[in-house]
Image (spheres, coloured by chain):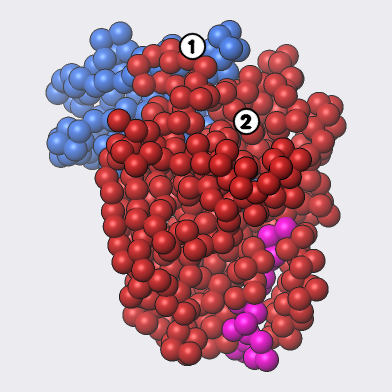
Chain colours: A blue, B red
Amino acid sequence: MKNFSGKVLFLDRSDINTDEIIPARYLTEITKEALKPFLLEDLSLPGFDSATDIKDKAVIVTRENFGCGSSREHAPWSLEVNGINVVIAESFARIFRQNMYNCGMFAIELPKEKIDYLFENYAGKDTSIEIDIDNDKIIVSSPGKSEEIEFSVGGFDKTLVREGGWVGYADKKY
Amino acid sequence: MGKTIAEKIFDSHRVEEPFPDTHVLKLDRVFCHEITTPIAITDLMARGMDRVFDPTKIKAVIDHVTPAKDSKTAEQGKIMREWAKRHGIKDFFDVGRNGVCHAIFPEKGFVRPGYTVIMGDSHTCTHGAFGAFAAGVGTTDLEVGILKGVCAFHFPKTIKFVLNGELKPGVYAKDVILFIIKQLTVNGATNKVIEFTGPIVEKMSMESRMTICNMAIEAGGTCGVCYPDMTTVDYLWDFIKDEYSTKEEALADYSKWVSDEDAEYEEIYEYDMSELEPMVTFGYKPDQVKSVKDMEGTKVDQIYIGSCTNGRIEDLRVAAKVLEGKKISDDVRGIVSPATPKIYSMALKEGIIDIFQDAGFCVTNPTCGACLGMSNGVLAEGEVCASTTNRNFNGRMGKGGTVHLMSPATAAATAIAGVITNSELFEA
């Protein structure tokens, strides 16, 4: 399994599309590693700077419909090569969400009030998140504060995370 | 309780349901292009699993950047080419025979009612126009599709649009789908199939049906679907005439891929489209849609007519009718990309290419290039494009550029005026 804990990058916007996550001009790359410097380069979000804000982050917390638009799996790959294997959002676009689990990564949906709570209480602080896959819990902490938030994912999604993705699992099974 | 098309296709293709609401489906078609497939190929090779489940069901094309613009895109083409040869994939469309995937694959008769189709491209939903379940997927799903001929889906609920009335002159399929996306918003159809039905759709050509299904993804939809009818049979007839003795027989067979009247829907929307006006997007999301008349006078730098949404012969004919005998504004540049070699040839024979060139358009080879800012018409910082494509995302056609989505008719009128318009055409 991949690493599912570390510092949090808060992206306070809905409908962040895959062109913003990894622009098409970089889709000519044929290795995942080559995508590393370009993650979120075109993100339209005041105050965000991809050159400095991504470093050392392992988890993204964001709003609605994250990953909409193009089917490019370069979007999860560009997260993965930057050490980000977890995105927590109010909702995801279908293809992006499936791509995350197909790569053995987490795309966790939380109700709006819980996402609001995370932004209100943890954004702008030195926040870390750890995913407890056995107990379906998100452990969120900032200096002097720590708590658990429950989440749920389907059996298929969890299996893909445990198996490290869809290719190995499908090859064994079909 | 009856079933929707999607339910019928799921039931007929289900291999198993390994977890609750996880349906592994057998695939009839796996479509591939050179942007999302090479990494699937190299990954399969690295795993020692360089195999394909059935070379006759895999169709491949180089379309996003063609001919290659640099060493990297040349390498992507080379990986595809060698892979197709190695595995005996006969339907591989290389430079000179290639077109935009969602135009050339239907044109070759590869999509039939009741089929399951995946491709590593979000606009795969286009093929639902034939009464198929066609979904865009990522590279890993594509890789498993290539290897095993299966793909896993959560069951998509269906929403149905019943479109009544008659479209006014100057109003086209693109205006209809922009209107629908405005109603649904960019995630209103997420994890859902959208059925397009009613007299408006029944009267539409396959080209127009592909235009509306193409943009189902812009509302988050898994697939857009139209019911197969005689229009579908006519379009496919050259490819299916050995399978059926008459068109009526084909139609009777395809009618099993129509939703039952008592099928259950998540939601049914009914609209009279008779008063619909030409529509155009503003901002950076495809649900930001206004009437053209509310955007008239907006300055543009480039006009682009083409893509899997609106690069088919019907689209070029409509644009040519507007452009005939006219010149585009000195302040804009126009680019047209017929979506396939066949469309290009038809346009040439019909005098459409002359009309575009005489008006001052650049005619490019079939390619997706400009739509996603990869080649053949990338915008500079701060530039604005009036485009018949499908996404107006920030920087989509070039970093710092803005895109207004519209019909080919509106794009042609805008080229002449140099600003967003179509009032003249609409009132005609």
Q: Which residues are magenta?
A: B319-340
In percent of width and height, residue A10 lies at 30, 39
Q: Tell me what residue is drawn at x 41 percent, y 53 percent.
A: B197
Q: Quadrant of residue B301?
A: bottom right
Q: Is residue B338 magenta?
A: yes
Chain of the residue where label 1 is placed in the rendered structure: A
Instruction: Name the element at disc 1.
Output: helix
- Checking the image for residue A163, the label placed there is 1
Give the x, y percent position of residue A54. 41, 38
The N terminus of chain B lies in which quarter of the figure?
A: top left
Within the image, what quadrant is residue B67 found in?
bottom right
Judging depth in this view, the residue of B170 and B205 nearest the camera is: B205
> What residue sits right under mark 2 in the picture?
B28
Q: Nearer the viewer, residue A154 or A5?
A: A154
Q: From the viewer's perspective, tell me whether residue B168 is left or right of residue B378.
A: left
Asked if one can make out residue B275 in the rendered structure from this viewpoint, the answer is: yes
Relative to the observer, which residue lies in front, B289 or B11? Answer: B11
Which mark is in front, 1 or 2? 2
Q: Give how far apart the Cα atoms at labels 1 and 2 are.
A: 27 Å
- Above or below: residue A131 compared with residue B341: above
The residue sitting at 47% across, 59% down in the picture is B202
Kindly identify the amino acid type of the residue bearing the numbered disc 1. Glu
Which residue is nearer to you in this view: B422 or B331?
Answer: B422
